[in-house]
Image: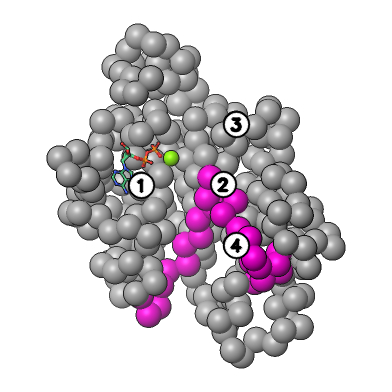
């Protein structure tokens, strides 16, 4: 395996559905430990990038390396998959499983771990996100906000016996979409806490300026299948680049044109 300091490296990464090139020859690198925000209007392909990184979709063309290892199969078809954890936009918990079963799902597959050990790790992860005594409940017995916390706890869980040398790559899809500013701040704190605890790299997809600014070191702007702008979070805050300026200020006039609204 090639030694690398890159958590992610892409070469001409592309995906098309029919005639539409949703992602068109994207090149980017994420260094180990870096925190990236991917921004862009709805339908620009942000969730698609996360699904490719999580191994839920294969690109049509181009190359993807995660922790230096070339990715050619979907994650379920890999023998020794990289440690990539996707927090979906909705909590995506399994409704018929308890909270403990949802969070401990991955550990359960490892037959060397006892029930008591899994219970202990699950409760530690739930406590990290501020949840106590919920492990025997079903998802629909919790509020939406609590379910969201459970989905963060699930991203925190680590099977120490499998991933001894690697740090995880955490992916967050629109974690604060539709939340009020205070709830958003809480989730942003939770992202930072999850990142610190997991001690890995992260990619946050978001429209929300506070989320972008509070959780990331650098920003990539996606539009029309291409990255139009890349820079640090400070550059993003006061760049006059027409794409960034329009996005940041919610202007209708500019290079970003609405497709479906
Ligand atoms: P974003 O997350 O930026 O809003 P998405 O990644 O969800 O955008 O989608 C990007 C584009 O790809 C959209 O135009 C969407 O309609 C299209 N798309 C996404 N998934 C599929 C699919 N499975 N089949 C066909 N088109 C898709
Ligand atoms: Mg999306």
Q: Is residue 189 visible?
A: no
Judging by the rendered image, the residue that carries numbered circle 3 is: 178
Image coordinates for residue 237, horizontal then vertical, percent = 50, 23
Beta carbon of the mark 1 residue lies under 8 A of ligand 1: yes
The residue closer to the viewer here, 186 or 195, is 186
Q: Is residue 18 left or right of residue 195?
A: left
Marks 2/3: CA–CA distance: 11 Å
The dot on residue 250 is none
Ligand 2 appears in which quadrant?
top left
Marks 4/3: CA–CA distance: 22 Å
The dot on residue 48 is 1
Q: Residues within 10 Å of mark 2 (few under 14, many from 20)?
A: some
**Mark earlier in primary sequence (3, 1):** 1
Q: What kind of element bears circle 1?
A: helix
Judging by the rendered image, the residue that carries numbered circle 2 is: 90
Q: Is residue 113 above or below residue 31?
A: below
Image coordinates for residue 255, horizontal then vertical, percent = 29, 17
Question: Looking at the image, which residue sits at the far top?
Answer: 253
Judging by the rendered image, the residue that carries numbered circle 4 is: 94
């Amino acid at each position: 395996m090639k030694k690398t300091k890159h958590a992610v490296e892409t070469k001409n990464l592309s995906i098309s559905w029919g005639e539409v090139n949703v992602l068109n020859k994207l090149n980017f690198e994420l260094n180990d430990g870096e925190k990236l925000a991917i921004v862009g209007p709805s339908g620009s392909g942000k969730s698609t990038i996360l699904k490719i990184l999580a191994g839920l979709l294969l690109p049509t063309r181009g190359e993807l390396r995660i922790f230096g290892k070339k990715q050619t199969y979907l994650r379920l078809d890999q023998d020794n998959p990289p440690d990539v954890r996707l927090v979906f936009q909705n909590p995506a918990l399994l409704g018929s499983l308890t909270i403990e079963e949802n969070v401990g799902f991955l550990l359960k597959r490892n037959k060397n771990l006892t029930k008591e050990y899994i219970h202990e790790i699950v409760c530690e992860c739930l406590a990290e996100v501020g949840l106590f005594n919920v492990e025997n409940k079903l998802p629909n017995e919790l509020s939406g906000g609590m379910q969201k916390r459970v989905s963060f706890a699930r991203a925190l869980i680590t099977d120490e016996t499998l991933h001894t040398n690697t740090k995880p790559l955490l992916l967050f899809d629109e974690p604060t979409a539709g939340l009020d500013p205070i709830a958003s701040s809480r989730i942003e704190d939770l992202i930072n806490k999850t990142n610190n605890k997991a001690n890995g790299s992260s990619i946050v997809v978001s429209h929300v300026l506070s989320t972008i600014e509070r959780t990331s070191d650098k920003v990539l702007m996606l539009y029309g299948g291409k990255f139009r702008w890349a820079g640090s979070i400070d550059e993003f805050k006061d760049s006059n680049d027409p794409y960034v300026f329009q996005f940041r200020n919610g202007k209708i006039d500019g290079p970003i044109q609405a497709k479906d609204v």
